[in-house]
Image (cartoon, rainbow, N blue to C red):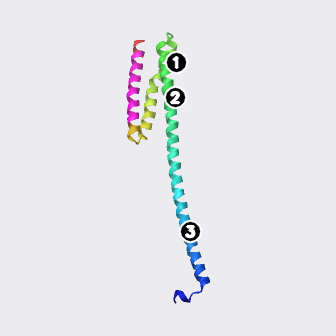
Amino acid sequence: MSLNNISVTRKLWGAILLLLAAMLTIAMLAASQAASVQAESARQIALVHDLIERSAVWKGLTDTAVTRGMANVISSDPAVGELFKDNLENDTKKITAIRVEIAKAATSDEDKAAMKNVAEKGAVLVAASKKATESS
């Protein structure tokens, strides 16, 4: 059977069906790619959201610990020291644990350098806090 023996109507319908099948294939591939991109975007957003939450908790704990430490050092009332004693002993452990969790998520060299800088400054803060507590 040669192409010349097929009617023009069948040739046109064949071409249309072939184009429709090609368009359907392209649409399915595009939809698959879009779903893949959306899933990766959702995963990245969830990761960033988790890091933001942890960072906010970390900042809050750090601010609170510094405030407690300062209140303990500048207060002449021993009741303040007793009130904050347990918290002052445990704050550094909690803050360090959260910092370590956040540092594990650091993937770029810039993030790792920032976390190293934070750890160094945190060590200076803890040392100053201990020194202030001992001298009071």
The type of residue carrying mark 1 is Leu
User: N-terminal of the two: label 1 or label 2?
Assistant: 2
Residue 82 x/y as whole percent: 50, 16
Residue under pointer 2: 60
Q: Main secondary structure of the magenta part?
A: helix
The type of residue carrying mark 2 is Gly
User: N-terminal of the two: label 3 or label 2?
Assistant: 3
- Left or right, 61 with reference to 104: right
Out of 66 and 107, give the one closest to the viewer: 107
- Left or right, 87 with reference to 108: right
Residue under pointer 3: 23
Please name the residue shown 50% across and 20% down the image: 67
Highlighted range, magenta: 113-132
Residue 116 x/y as whole percent: 38, 33
Q: Does 29 sit above or below residue 76?
A: below
In the picture, the disc for residue 83 is 1
- Left or right, 120 with reference to 56: left
Residue 31 x/y as whole percent: 55, 60
Q: Hey, which residue is sitting farthest top in the picture?
A: 76
Of labels 3 and 1, the one closer to you: 3
